[in-house]
Amino acid sequence: MIVNIEGKSILTATMEERIWHRNYDPWVSKALNYPGIPVSKLLENTAEKYPKRDALIFIGERITYSKLLKLSNQFAHSLTDLGVKKGDRVALYLPNTPHIVIAYYGTLKAGAIVVNTNPLYTERELRYQLEDSGANTIVTLNLKRTLLNIISVIDKIRLKNIIIGSVDDFLPFPKNLIYSIIKRTEIGAIPSKGGYYRFTELIKRRSQSPEVNVDPEDIAVLQYTGGTTGISKGAALSHKNLLVNAYQVRSWIGEEGILDGKERILTVLPCFHVYAMTVCMNIGVMVGATLILLPRFNPDEVLRVVKKYRPTIFPGVPTIYTAIANHPDVKRYGMDSVKLCLSGGAPLPSTAASRVF
């Protein structure tokens, strides 16, 4: 329910005793108070509290919380300028690059609904999800494997706006030049007509938050299921759903498990999946953590990043932890900076944890 305390809207849980409370660890609260705010407010609050702290690290490039807020505001304004209205669907067809974090919070700021879309989808899978969700805007990279899928389906569905970014948009010099040379065969040509827009051009808009009234009960995300037992379905998640989940996980970890403004989260799980969207992105932004973004899982690259940036939190799945545990040089790179792992998706073999830490 929603109550009003000192003029502030607060979402509060019932204190009634439940059977499952008996299995709670001592530090886990049986009931929590939740601020009645949209998810994008988490970014605003943290940018005000930790403006100069790194929000994102991506292949050497660092983006502070003040800059992330500015970029998200600019993206939100670009959506409204393109005719995107409150309640419209915006598909994020992206891997873990700064684009997905900027576009996620920018879309929510504009009052639109995020449709998380796997960048490995085939043309058929992409078309189904875009049609089913009713998305009129999509954000992706200029990689052939994603861009060509969009070009193939655009005449068959009602997409109006195609926003195209590039990995080198957020790479420091000279890595941006090196990337464009090494990956030139993987980069597709962006059509000059037909509703295509460059991401970097759009984020030159106004840097204030757009004036859109977003209620906690409004839908924030359409998260599609895996479709293992039938056709994939879009689960409608409200701002309240996402906010409550983030606060609950924070409580379950424990107040001493995550220190505000101190953590570095190794974000190799895909942010288009609900797991990483919550434990990496929403919780990370809520507590002012630094998200170390990796577009894909490669054991060698993960270990190099661990050694260089010393993450303190490492969310993963058993296959990731097992691959790291079986790496011949895991002890040489060292995982002692990691104080917390969150594993999901399947049972975690006890041998994996004991061999890594």
Image (tube, helix red, strand yellow):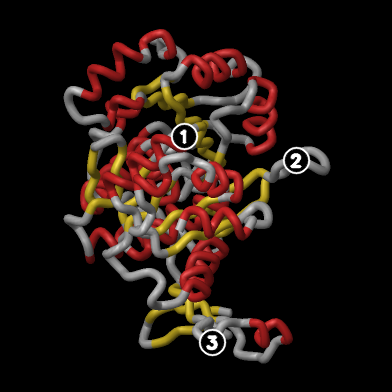
Using the numbered discs, state the Cα–Cα distance from disc 3 to disc 1 in whole angstroms. 37 Å
Q: Mark 1 points at which residue?
A: 298
Name the spot of residue 219 as percent of width and height, x first.
Answer: 57, 55
Question: Closest to the observer: 152 or 17?
Answer: 17
Amino acid marked by disc 1: Asn
Q: Quadrant of the N terminus?
A: bottom right
306 vs 53: above or below: above
Q: Mark 2 points at which residue?
A: 227
Q: Residue at x 42, y 45 (%)?
A: 330
Precedes in sequence: disc 3 or disc 1: 3
Callout 2 environment at 10 Å: few (<14), some (14 to 19), or many (20+)? few
Name the spot of residue 291 as percent of width and height, x first.
Answer: 35, 50
Question: Closest to the observer: 19 or 335?
Answer: 335
Q: Residue at x 27, y 45 (%)?
A: 308
Callout 1 environment at 10 Å: few (<14), some (14 to 19), or many (20+)? few
- Circle 3 sits in a helix, a strand or a loop, which is it? loop
